Amino acid sequence: MNQDARIIEAYVGEYASGKSEIAINRALELQRMQRKVTLVDLDIVEPFYTLRPIKESLEKEGLNVIAYSRSDSFGLGETGAMLNPQARWALRNEGDVIFDVGYGIHGAKTLNLIEEAAQSGITVLAVINYMRPMTGSVKLIKEYIKELGIVHAIVANTHLGDETTLDIIIKGNLEIFEAARQIEIPVAYIAIEEKHKESVNKEEFIVPVKFIRRYMPAAIW
Amino acid sequence: MEKIIGEPKKAFMTGNETIAWACLAAGADIMFGYPITPQNEVMHYWTRLAPKYNKGFLQTEDELSAGFTTCGAVQAGKKAFTATAGPGNVLMQEPFGMAEAMRLPVLAIIQQRGGPSSGTVIYSQQEVTLTTFGGNGEGHRIVYSTATHQELYDYVIKGFNTAWKYRFPTFVLGDGYQAKMREPLEMYEPLDKGIELVEAYPLIGVPGQIGVDREPQHLCNIYSLEEELYDVVMQMSEEYESISPDIIEFQAKDCEDAEIIIISHGVVSRVADDAVKILRAQGIKAGYFRPITLRPFPRQQLKDVIANSSAKQILIAESAYGQLERLVKQEIYGETVKINNLFMPGVGIIDFDIINKVKSII
């Protein structure tokens, strides 16, 4: 059982900003602390794709994963927007609940569909990658976060996939810090792929640094 | 023209997003579209960018309309494009046929999904036949098959130029994986890379009095007599064949000493490239051939590659049940190499699949 108050977080942000990767890493981080964790794929536009290919491997690591499996998808085809009932009632699960909220700005609005979300004390974190053109300047980041609605904190996730350099991480995230300062939303942490661990001095940053593992390449998306 | 990108810069994006930016960088004026997965985010990103750059967008009532409005806009001298997939690509063949007949510089981005019919929304290479030869009659078109996000960016820009320079409808053939996956690429202003953008110009309503200052503009998709049509089709075929050498693009690697040549296109060529490297590291002499233009097809280039290699066999690998194979077979008619295939319709192919197949046949 979880020793203290349950943690309920939702990761929102631009399409391909790294929401799923951050949500998975966060869920596993909590699970390693011997907490009971439910990870929810809350993509109502493309409900079968994001976490499905890696659902089983995440379950093997001890997570409770709410996402469709191959057998669940039969017959649904190109269904319009649909909400997995298990996701709708995800907060009734015991322990921590981490929502991976798919599909950008409109995705963020789907949090309203989660039963008891309003009373749950949910923390909404916006994942921002400065190397994505839609969030590639202080001005654009500010505009973008405003469109998302309620955001409690930012995860600075600047990277360029396999071509990420320390320079990119530092320069990009500094721009995110500046945007965060101007709109007065705190940066919760910086996410950096663990392969850069050796070259990053955590002390250089004014906010916590979390080293993440990439799980999504195995999911293709 | 307004600078869109500024200094060349690296970005991390999905393929659909890449296409929207490339259209902007290429100076596109307007997109016409109708939603279908997996091309939806081309529209989503274009509609987010369009208001900022004073560009146009119209969501029509279906793909027939999206295709025909694109045909209309280019006649008015607008750089117009559309994007579709699967059953949407089927519906658009009628307007694409009109573009072939009237020589309209339409650019269409196709993100292949699974079939037949609605199939899957995910991925395939099953729209090769439709995209290369989907029109009725015998019109002509140009089809680029891309493999990376960088190529999506490069060939969208090139595609507009090709369409407006040669006046044949032009296609950038991607797929659901390219549409949705994300990887880094460099965005740039075409001029900074020495790419002159071909200016759009009105095809109708041009200045001057007909019969006095200029000949009338006849953009026809129907003729009264069979002889008239015959002349047009023959003349278009002749012109297409004469420009084809300037348009054809392909890649060939490690073929000279190869005992087997792997032929693939699009996203599958990425794993074919990896497979060749791994096979060679294991002592198996494999070669790699990739048509970039599926139409016009690099016929002579492939024949030359086969002739100049020691290959006794080829392997055609595709996420379809023989669409690339059909193209290749008709183009290399007369060659005596044994043709093997790895058909995986609607699913991804990884290097392991190709390596296993090669080991099973040599």
Image: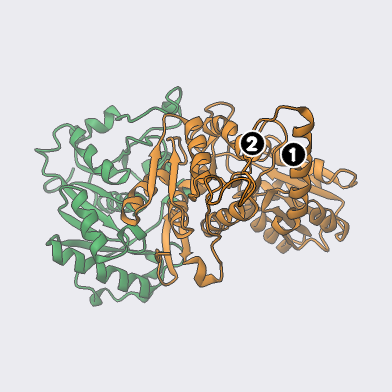
Which dot marks residue B246? none
Q: Is residue B259 left or right of residue B185?
A: right
Residue furthest left as drawn: A119
- Residue visible at 80% across and 48% down in the picture: B314
The residue that label 1 is drawn on is: B232
Q: Which chain is green?
A: A
Q: Position of residue B336 (x, y in %)?
A: 90, 46
Query: Can residue A53 be seen from the camera position used here?
Result: no
Q: Quadrant of the N terminus of chain A?
A: top left
Mark 2 Cα shell of 10 Å, populated few (<14), some (14-19), many (≥20): few
Residue type pointed to by label 1? Val
Q: Which chain is orange?
A: B
In the image shown, does A3 or A211 lie closer to the viewer? Answer: A211
In the image shown, does A97 or B294 lie closer to the viewer? Answer: B294
- Residue visible at 24% across and 37% down in the picture: A110
User: Looking at the rendering, which quadrant does residue A72 occupy?
Assistant: top left
In the image shown, does B25 or A78 lie closer to the viewer? Answer: B25
The residue that label 2 is drawn on is: B220
Query: Can residue A87 be seen from the camera position used here?
Result: yes
Q: Position of residue B75 (x, y in %)?
A: 53, 44
Residue type pointed to by label 2? Cys
Instruction: Say whether marks 2 and 1 touch (CB < 8 Å).
Output: yes
Q: Is residue B326 left or right of residue A134?
A: right
